Amino acid sequence: MNIVILAAGMGKRMNSDLPKVLHPLAGKPLLAHVIETARALAPLKLFVVYGHGGEKVPQTMLASDLAFVRQEPQLGTGHAVMQAASQLDESVPTLVLYGDVPLTAVASLRRLSAAAGTDQLAILTVDLDDPNGYGRIVRDDGRIVRIVEQKDASKQELMIGEVNTGIMIAPTAKLKHWLSALSNRNAQEEYYLTDIVAQAVAEGVAVVSAQPDAVWETLGVNSKVQLAELERIHQCNTASMLLEQGVTLADPARIDVRGKLNCGRDVSIDVNCIFEGHVTLADGVSVGANCVIRDSKILAGAQIRPFCHIDGAEVGANSQIGPYARLRPGANLGEEVHIGNFVEIKNSRIAAQSKANHLAYVGDSTVGSRVNIGAGAITCNYDGANKHQTVIEDDAFIGTNCELVAPVRVGSGATLGAGTTLTRDAPAGSLTVSRAKQVTIDTWKRPTKSK
Ligand code: UD1
Ligand code: MG
């Protein structure tokens, strides 16, 4: 099929300078959700009609399989589809989607497409308790005869609960011909796509309908209130899927997944965690409350304690992270590593069973196995212009409050005395201390306040 996504409308009620379809839901633009759904249908051609907000839409969404068509000025949904008409492939039908309706399930669109076949017009409709604002499906003897917009509807037509979701599929050659015959003689002086229905009926082309599994699939975003509502629906759906897979969620209403979260068996997640990008939690991982985890892999049995921030990191099996730990991009931890409170790790490999339990910064480093990094130890990786590497070999012991001025190497089994400022390599197996010897000065007196 051809797919045309309508995304030129201005979204006045968003009260925002950002084009409506670029507002994020679950961390990505509304339009990106629609494009993802469209791609799942493997269209021959995929168009996005944009207009309001200028070039921001194509600039943000640029991809090789998308053709952007500008609609200027925006004279209605029919006028929008017209802009792409000449490029539509007549050998397949054309599906119209809305860029501000982000949660439509692929299964519902397949059902719509099956209902249409190759030569019928099919409309995705829903029955609403409150159909206010929508185009109504007018039927005669059960058969669809036309769609009437709210502003053009008679009192009787306003009582109809079955509404047009806006999503429809049409035989392409006929669609082009119907579009060319649209007029804007209506309450809004717009070229209504919905008017093709009456044309189809007049020409004896069957008009059929299909229904989605759930009404929320067809809800659009016109305001921040609706955006927030759809965000909750989407998060709730994601939480339900995780529960069904066997993930334990302390509260399914208090998890946010903005991307893809893959979980193994017996994973448990406490409240208020946010997952962004691609996150993997392997078998038996537990995540404490209030963690933010982005683009990271947490291997089997690792425990992430509350209030951790993990971004672009890999945590080895059976490791213990946090509370209050920060793993930054390139943090790569082996098995059974312990990273405790107020420890920051960046662009560093830390091998199995090493520990940094309190108040440390490890950046641009390679740390061996069974290393102990004391409280307050810092790698001084930045000289103000360039970053330098620190190497700490297996079984080294870094005393409290050491500064390792990179580039520098601590040999295997070496010990750094507390407070050492290491500016040259520390030899393996020995104690290196750089601080001054402690002295007690008996003659010293505290100064007193002068009157
Ligand atoms: C439209 C339908 C209505 C349906 C409702 C479902 C028409 C005439 N009416 O009404 O039957 O019940 O959607 O939500 O089709 N757009 C453009 N260019 C334009 C105008 C709109 O690209 O010139 C895009 C918008 O960005 C939006 C979509 O088309 O994604 C729908 O436009 P909107 O103005 O919301 O249509 P409604 O009046 O709600
Ligand atoms: Mg609308």
Image (cartoon, helix red, strand yellow):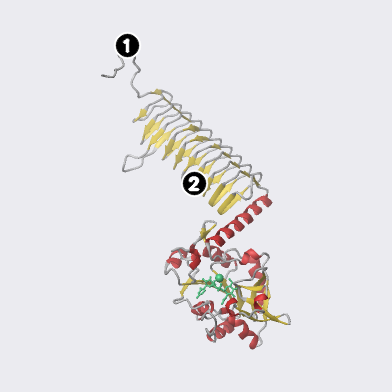
Question: What distance separates the C-alpha of mark 2 from that of mark 1?
Answer: 53 Å
Considering depth in this image, is 58 or 385 the residue closer to the camera? Answer: 58
Q: Give the crowd class for mark 2: few <14, some 14-19, many >=20 residues within 10 Å.
A: many
Left or right of 362: which side holds 120? right
Q: Is residue 256 above or below residue 376?
A: below
Classify mark 1 as within 8 Å of ligand 1 or not, answering yes or no. Answer: no
Which circle's residue, 2 or 1, is located before the other in the chain? 2
Find disc 1 in the rendering and name its residue: 442
Q: Which residue is at 50% across, 36% downward? A: 351
The kind of residue tagged 1 is Asp
Specify whether residue 349 is in view: yes
Quadrant of res 91: bottom right
Q: Secondary structure at mark 2?
A: strand
Considering depth in this image, is 152 or 76 the residue closer to the camera? Answer: 152
Considering depth in this image, is 394 or 404 the residue closer to the camera? Answer: 404
Residue 189 in the image, given as x and y percentages of width and height? 51, 81
How many badges with numbers are in the image?
2
| Mark number, residue 311 | 2
Q: Secondary structure at mark 1?
A: loop
Residue 223 in the image, given as x and y percentages of width and height? 53, 63
Left or right of 223: which side holds 364? left
Residue farthest to the front?
A: 451
The kind of residue tagged 2 is Asp
Considering depth in this image, is 76 or 111 the residue closer to the camera? Answer: 76
Quadrant of res 435: top left
Residue 318 in the image, given as x and y percentages of width and height? 59, 37
Q: Quadrant of the C terminus?
A: top left
Looking at the image, in which quadrant does ligand 1 appear? bottom right
